[in-house]
Amino acid sequence: MANFISLILLLLPTYLIRFTVFGIPTTVLEILIYIVFLYGFWRARQDGFKPIPRKIYLPIGLLIFALIISTIISPDKRTALGELKGFFIDPLLVGWLIFQYLKEKDITKIFAGLIGSGLFVGIHTIVQKFLGHVTADGRVIGIFGYSPNYVALFLAPIAVLLIAYGLTLVIQKKYFPSIFYFLFFIFYLVAIYFSGSRGGFLAVGGGLGIFVILYYWTWIRAHLAAKIMIAVLIIMALATTWSLFRPDFSLSPETGGRATSSNNVRFQIWQASTELAIKNPKNTILGVGLGNFQNAFDKLTKERANFPEYITPMALTPHNLFLMFWFSSGLLGLVAFLWLLVIFYREGFKKLLSSKTTPIILAIVSTIIIYGFIESSIWKNDLGILFWTFWTLIWIIDSSKFKSPLPKVRHANAK
């Protein structure tokens, strides 16, 4: 089963191959997921289902309930059902397969499938750059179309996987295989650079920093100087991030360039998005309906200068993961998502000191969340599967079978 799940992850970009079955829109990726799920469900009926802990299925159940309500209230039921199916149901089926069948020894196969998928996307991006297939400002849109950011959204978590796993091999003195991970990591960074996404580099840097902190957590916890240094680095990182992404409405796009234009547009989208909730209590509680954010945004801002021409076309989402959950699934959906993050990190920290894989998984999910502060980093077929894959992997780790890979710490009061 691990090979089948790895195949799904290898073929993530095949969600772009779309067709209909009995009038129902679907994709090659979706059909593959359903085939593997049906086979896995049949096998589980024969061998017995692995019980799902209550702390897992309660927040997931709440999220599905919130999404169903948002589908019912959405004025565009076809789009809402498509997002419910493609962004959540399909990824959850993959997550169930991982939880039901995989052991920690299988995680490397999952890594291999994702790395292969990322290589395909990266090669396509780099080839487009050298062929001159770029936007007016030199960015490569890539295989996903519409926005160059989609390339970075897909590659950033896998890039962190590469560098984190490569560093783990170096620490274990497995130098030769680590070379390939580092080379692939550089390759991914080149593709992200060609996409022109500053958020991609922010997410990769943040994810890498979190991996290093988690991997050496016992040593850091025992040394005050290390804690102070990390605190200083975090403050510097936040200050740098603000300087790179803060809006500046005193500059025009011509004067400030693409970065200023992007920052200003994102800030205006955040500002107008918040108004959607403040001006309508129903939106505050239930959201605007699944798949209806851009339409609601357009109705609110259609009379405002520059919005219909320049800003609304960029507002497919509010460019923030938490706002997207709020507006697309209501307060219940946002609470469910935050609940899912809390139990994920709690489980991860429980296993942090006994599994060599845990810091990698935590760093990858953190990469997705960091990117989610400036983009809706789960709200797409492939991105949803990426998130739920790593969210589920933390639950299959049996910490009792592994010795801690972390360096031993000699405390100051040790003799």
Image (cartoon, grey):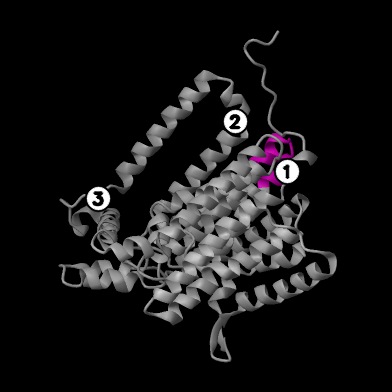
Q: Position of residue 121 (x, y in %)?
A: 55, 65
Q: Position of residue 35 (x, y in %)?
A: 71, 77
Residue 174 seen in render? yes
Q: Which image quarter: residue 47?
A: bottom right
Q: Nearer the viewer, mark 3 or mark 2?
A: 2
- Indicate yes or no whether the magenta region holds residue 30: no
Image quarter where the N terminus lies is bottom right
* Residue drawn where x is 53% and y is 46% of the image: 342
CA separation in Å, label 2 and label 1:
26 Å
* Residue drawn where x is 57% and y is 26% of the image: 220
Tell me the SS state at disc 2: helix
* Residue drawn where x is 76% and y is 74% of the image: 39
N-terminal of the pair, mark 2 or mark 1, is: 1
**Which residue was labeled with disc 1?**
176
Magenta span: 166-179
**Which residue was labeled with disc 3?**
247
Question: Camera-side residue: 80 or 354?
Answer: 80
**Furthest residue toward bottom:** 22
Disc number for residue 217: 2
CA separation in Å, label 3 and label 2:
35 Å
Q: Main secondary structure of the magenta part?
A: helix
